[in-house]
Image: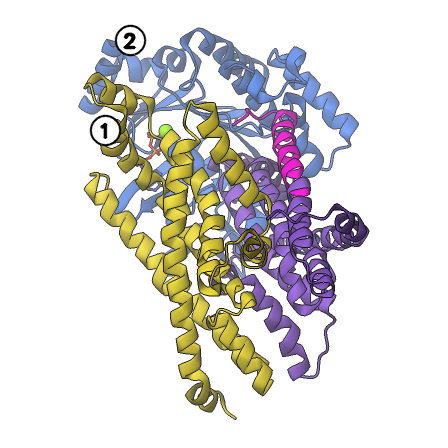
Amino acid sequence: MFDWRWEFVLDILPRLVKATGNTVLAALLGYGIAMVLGLVFALAQRTPFPLLNRAVRECVEFIRSTPLVLQIFFVFYVGPQFGVMLSPWTAGMIAIGLHYASYLSEVYRAGIDSVPRGQWEAATALSLNPVRTYSRIIIPQAIPTAFAGMGNYLVGIFKDTPMLSVIGVAELMHTANAIGSEHYRFLEPYTLVGLIFLLISLPTAAALRKTEAKIRRKLGLRSL
Amino acid sequence: MTYVEFLKVYGPQLLEGSATTGMQTLLAAALAIIIAVTAGLMRLSKNRFVYGAATVYIEIFRGTSLLVQLYWIFFVLPLFGLTLEKFTAGYLAVGMNLGAYGAELVRGGILSVPKGQWEAATALSMSPAKRMVRIIFPQAFLNMLPPWGNLLIELLKGTALVALISVADLMFVARKINGSTYMSAQAFGSALLIYYVMSRAVVTPFMRWLELVMARKLGRA
Amino acid sequence: MKDSMKDYPLKLEGDNIPMVRFQNVTKRYGDLVVLDHLDLDVQEAEMVTIIGPSGSGKTTVLRMLMALEKINDGVIYVEGQPMTHMVKDGTLTMADNKYLRQQRMNIGMCFQHFNLFPHMTALENCIEAPVQVLGLSKKDAIARAEDLLDMVGMLEKAHEHPSRLSGGQQQRVAIARSLAMRPKIMLFDEVTSALDPEVIGEVTQVIRKLVSKHNLTMLMVTHQMGFAREISDRVCFFYDGKIEEQGSPDELFGDPKSERTQQFLSAVLEAN
Ligand SMILES: Nc1ncnc2c1ncn2[C@@H]1O[C@H](COP(=O)(O)OP(=O)(O)O)[C@@H](O)[C@H]1O
Ligand SMILES: [Mg+2]
């Protein structure tokens, strides 16, 4: 029953390792986009313009409650319909960046909301302007709360990159599929992909937990 | 072709796909709940073997991708003599994956019940099982409902992946229409809207209602 | 409301302009009237203490002056200039945020729960606004902060984060933080209420020092009647969003006229 072939494993491992690089790159790029866009989404819900706040809120809700894989298809195929060709990488990064930006905006929002009202008032009493109030008082305190969520989504985006294979981004899953159909063997490539994911995501999650504790200590906050 | 005409021609197919998505969601949710409660309780066990088994399960399913799990279950399990129908493989993968996330919610919910409640139940000579079922779990259940709302939406979204093993769900239908008409905005856009409606007009209100009912039952509303 | 703004001067003129003037100030939360057409003047270098039952609007008076809450009616003047409003096209209109930030620089406020910035050390708390708002160089700000921390007896703990300080220590740092802006007016809202009894003295000692050595105008809300009597130039007894009675400490504590004041004072004395 166990027909595991080590020579085959050694044969395909270099290709998979190379594809892992692409997977990590996609995750980091997408996450970078998401971090910036997410902050824009979060702050755009706290403007003095209720209509804008509401519109951004609805967009975030929409992106959050629909499947990423469908959004990837949407971005990739709708462009050409209107004469805009997007490469798989570009389309993939837009889709996954937007999707995770909506998640991260919620994380930021919760972080900002967790800062006690007295902190806003103390900043006001000291005449700090809004930019300084956010950058020096509120956001530094929101980070420890937000960090856990941000870490979860970093691991999350990494695990969602296989969906990019559906439009032909040559990451791990795409490579495993290619190997599988070339050799008519799926056991080793799919199992190895699973192992590679475990090998990266479990230590990353552990390291993030450690860093979170460190940040809290550094900022002089009590640990949770 | 206007959008109305598009809907006239392809609406029925989209609805059929939506029904399949609904079925996948229901079955996967049922499985996820069973797994979550079981693994969540196992994670609270003092028995190292029981605790370890649940931990391994949770780490494996949370440490890898749903898509990888789906392909593994559908393409690799047959090599071990376990061939699953694609529809079954679909909700099995989704349910097992989200069940691992749910297990941590169950564990957290139970731990959030104050220690005094455990002690009071013990002082009343309740058996551990009675204490869990009658006293602890109902309170834990209410505490964990809000995160379960988010989890169920993740689960609904997760079912879109079963299209990749050719289960004819909403996502699958949208791709099929796109392939034959190249009306990508209409095909994928409609599917996005339907998923949105299912999340926000079905799952979320249902969870809100459940929270309200449970809160009332526990005298907290 | 627009029309009635004509009843208020664009600025106070003449001799003896009060440091702070509440003129006909009303604050409502929904239907609840928290301050009811309040008139109150505070002269320069005066120490005015506000006492009264919980919920009578004491905190709100300070928060209105700091413009942490929007005013519903009336005008507050600081040094004769409107604080809550600004002059635009020859009439008083609601102050915008920029104007308020400018005006607030004259005022320092200490809160019941200190509200120190937890991610900054005591010293960093004290230099933040002087550097960011007043534009002081970091060196000057540190020198100023160290002076003040020394004054409140916290220089030794300058590099500690608030979580490592006791309540009394945190409150002393908070006072130093406010003073670092060189305000003309200081507001104290029950600064000792959240403290353990044995450390109240270290905070009141700092306030005593301020009264004797500095020319600050101060408004203080407190439940410590002995301290209020000792230190105030004037005491206001608040009841239901109004000043029920006011006078010198000896008048108000020694010979209260209003029945409500008498009741309140005897209830407080009994509790002690
Ligand atoms: N943000 C608010 N919303 C609604 N009511 C408030 C708010 N802040 C204060 N109040 C009410 O205003 C009244 C006066 O409050 P406050 O000035 O804090 O009283 P004090 O400091 O004298 O105890 C109280 O009845 C309080 O409940
Ligand atoms: Mg108060």
Where does label 2 land, which residue?
C272
Where does label 1 land, which residue?
B130
Q: Which quadrant of the rendered structure holds the C terminus of chain B? A: top left
Color of chain A here?
purple
- Which element is circle 2 on? loop
Quadrant containing ligand 2 reads top left
Residue at the location (71% across, 23% down)?
A: C144
In the image, the chain rendered in yellow is B
**Based on the displayed image, in which of its 4 quarters is residue A165 positioned?**
bottom right
C-beta proximity under 8 Å, tags 1 and 2: no
- The disc at residue B67 is none
For badge 2, the amino acid type reads: Asn
For badge 1, the amino acid type reads: Lys
Coordinates of residue C20 in the picture (x, y in percent): 47, 35
Above or below, A216 against A147 in this view is: above
Color of chain C here?
blue
Magenta region: which residues? A200-224
**Residue placed farthest to the top in the image?**
C198
